[in-house]
Image (cartoon, rainbow, N blue to C red):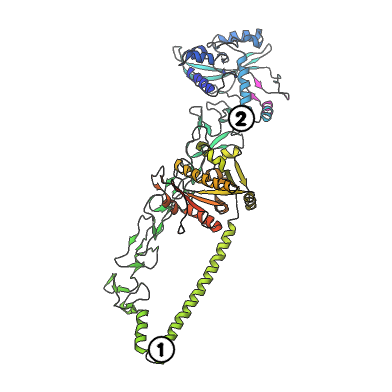
Amino acid sequence: VAYGNEVLNVYAAAKKLDLLADYLWVIPFDIDLQAVASGSADQEATRAGMVGWISCFPDPMYDNRMAWFQEQLASAPRHHLNHSGLEGLLGDGPGVCDSYCPFMYDAVWTVAIAVGRVGVAEDGSLDKAALLKAIREVEFEGASRQVRYDSSGERDESETPVILKNARAITTDDGRRAAGVAMVETWQWWPGESGGLKRVGGDENAPVWPGGGAPTWTVPPDRIICPLGTVLSQLSLECEACPPGTRPVISPLDNHPSCVNCPAGTHSFSAGPGELAVCQLCQPGSAAEEGAAECTLCPAGSAADAPGQERCTACPPGSAASERGQELCSPCGQASFQNATASTACRSCPAGMVTVAPNSRDEAACVCPVGSYLDGDDSRRCRQCKALWTTRDKGARSAGECELKDSTRSMIIAAAVCGTAVPCALLAAYHAMKSRVRKAEAELQRAMDSEMKRRLDAAMATLRDMNHSMVLLSSAYFLRVPAAKLRGLHETLRNEGMLVFLDCHEQIVEFKRAGTEILFFSYEWLSFQQPGPNDVQLAAMRAAALTFDRECKARGRELFIWLDIVSIPQISPALKDLAVNSLYAYASCADHMVIIAPDSRHANTGHVANLDTAASRVWLRAEQVSHMAHAGISSLHVQTQDSLEPVPAEWL
């Protein structure tokens, strides 16, 4: 600190953290604390709160003060040079040397450097044994000389020079003192006849920082210990929250916190007080490059069909996306086509024409429908076959491809020849042939159904594989936990011991056999900033959880909840990917699944969210299909703001 208002900021922080009564505060600068207290809004309270505070700094070693200090230091023990006592509100003005100040300053730095090496846990706890060991290993050039400790923790006195650091003020041409610091000088006192107070060489235009290293005006990052979720600002020299688009990490090299960019396909936003920023997957229909503060909706003409996309994919020929934020490009229908990429709409075929198949890419795919043929005089117009005539397929190019309809032909044959046995036998043979064809088609369909069942069985087997533990929260805690703590995400509840981890399918089976049931919430995120459910969705979740919790208790069982923001790790991208890749296994293992679909709106796009939008989200449908493939449709419910109901039979 260098100015009175900064001291008041320190005082306000100490008061807020309740660190006034039992702590000794030392301000390492030549500041008159009496004057500082007098300048506060509440002078008396500030003076009372700052009783015992000390402001001290190695005496400015220029002009005639240097000779005075040499004389005093040579003739008196260190502790006799203290011009400030330890009682009352203290702080002498500039020019008075407090010889204990360098030692107090270096003692604080010893602890600070040791804490930086050991690191502080997320909950603020500190390994005291590791800290004491680290303190004994600290060694640096300090304000009081070379600082090192012996094995018992005593100050090593083998180095005798006293080191003082002096911040020399900038002066104007007429001798007046200006704001700021011009340079930092380092002085050493050497005993003996040839000794005395001598300035140590070095860059005279930059400070020498405790802990060693080259002089620099930039604060070395390892000299300031910022809490996790913040980073040192070289501009303000304060710990500031990780900026949007980044997440907090602890460096494995020095245990210091830093902020790194969120990977592509994710985003982060500024966290609130006491919260850590996390990188959230972009939802389908949006994308983000590395270090993005928010996900960007896919522009019209493009789509993103899965979470975590770095960029949106342009719609290929034969498809289009008419709106922003689409998960899938819509295929061109049977009367339209598109030959360009990134299209917002398909082009219509000429009037009366259809395409050979959906997703057509060229106007040449537009043909005449069944029962018509291409007009020879106009390649963009179709003519109808005459009455009782048709074509075998669409795309006929001339009237010669028109033929009698099967029903018409049968009527003519029956009317013309059924008076004799032989023609009637021919007619019977014709119908027998059609019967054999139908039988062969049925056998082929059964074979196709059998192959499909084989593939489904194989897919079902993969639902047993989990790359990450299934993480659950008891419904009792879910129903009472504050929303703010719930949005503290997986890591907060994990560190408090509120989560249950099931590492494999067999553990899940045993867990349920012990008298528990699992409820899985399927819902869409409605904000790019706030992870998880909004307030309306959370209220619907708790309503559903309360209903199932009561039913479970009536059966003598206990209910546990699977909810993405607490069941999927959020800070580590690698762990998050493992859990996301296991999502369908989690859904298939749940006893109940509730689709959360109260009427609401997306906080950023304004799009309406309800049961219809929940039914159209590919990501949610995949969860629901995984669950129904294992448990059937009877365990799938929908919770709106009004009621909890089973899904209708036609839900799929």
Instruction: Magenta stretch: give its range.
Output: 133-153
Q: Which mark is residue 424?
A: 1
Name the mark nearer the viewer: 1 or 2: 1
Q: Is 561 situated above or below 96?
A: below
Choose top left, top right, bottom left or bottom right for residue 203. top right
Q: Is 122 situated above or below 588?
A: above
Residue nearest the viewer, comparing 411 with 280: 411
Q: CA distance from mark 1 to mark 2?
A: 102 Å
**Label 1 element class:** helix
Q: Which mark is residue 341?
A: none
Within 10 angstroms of label 1, few (less than 14), some, or many (20 or more) residues?
some
Q: Is residue 512 visible?
A: yes
Residue nearest the viewer, comparing 28 with 530: 530
Picture residue at 39% right of the left edge, 59% below the top: 319
- x and y percentages locating residue 459 in the rendered image: 56, 60
Residue nearest the viewer, comparing 188 with 587: 587
Q: Is residue 1 visible?
A: no
Q: Which residue is mark 2?
A: 116
Which amino acid, by three-letter code, is at mark 1? Cys
Horizontal relation, residue 409 to residue 591: left or right: left
Q: Please give the count of numbered marks on the rendered protein.
A: 2
Q: Is 535 situated above or below 428?
A: above
Within 10 angstroms of label 2, few (less than 14), some, or many (20 or more) residues?
many
Which amino acid, by three-letter code, is at mark 2? Gly
